Amino acid sequence: MQRMTGKEYLYIDIANQYGNGLDKSSWEDRINWVDSNLSKLESLIDEADDKYLFVKAIYALRDTQRGISTGFIMGMDK
């Protein structure tokens, strides 16, 4: 199993909740997509497949960036 950082898992969850085909992409593609869109994630909310979970993941990321522990929980398929 590939080991990832907490940040990478959070990026993957953001991409998963955004959807629009990203949830079928490789882990690396999902991480790269979030990294490329980091400064404008909030502007993409209306395009997300699951707006509520997308916003929740973005809030967790922004808290993490400020050094705030989130206790964020996400699900992953096998």
Image: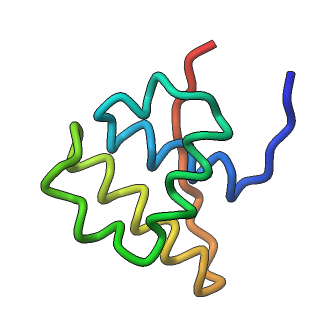
Q: In this view, does 39 lie above or below 71?
A: below
- Residue 19 at x, y percent in the picture: 33, 35
Which residue: 52% across, 67% down? 61
- Residue 77 at x, y percent in the picture: 56, 17
Q: In this view, does 3 lie above or below 31?
A: above
Q: In this view, does 23 lie above or below 39?
A: above
Which residue: 52% across, 28% down? 25
Which residue: 68% across, 51% down? 8
Give the left or right position of residue 67, taking residue 24 as reference.
right
- Residue 45 at x, y percent in the picture: 21, 59
Give the left or right position of residue 20, taking residue 6 as reference.
left
Which residue: 50% across, 43% down? 13
Give the left or right position of residue 30, taking residue 37 as reference.
right
Assign the N terminus to one quadrant of the image. top right
Assign the C terminus to one quadrant of the image. top right
Q: How many marks?
A: 0
Looking at this view, is 61 or 43 the one in front? Answer: 43
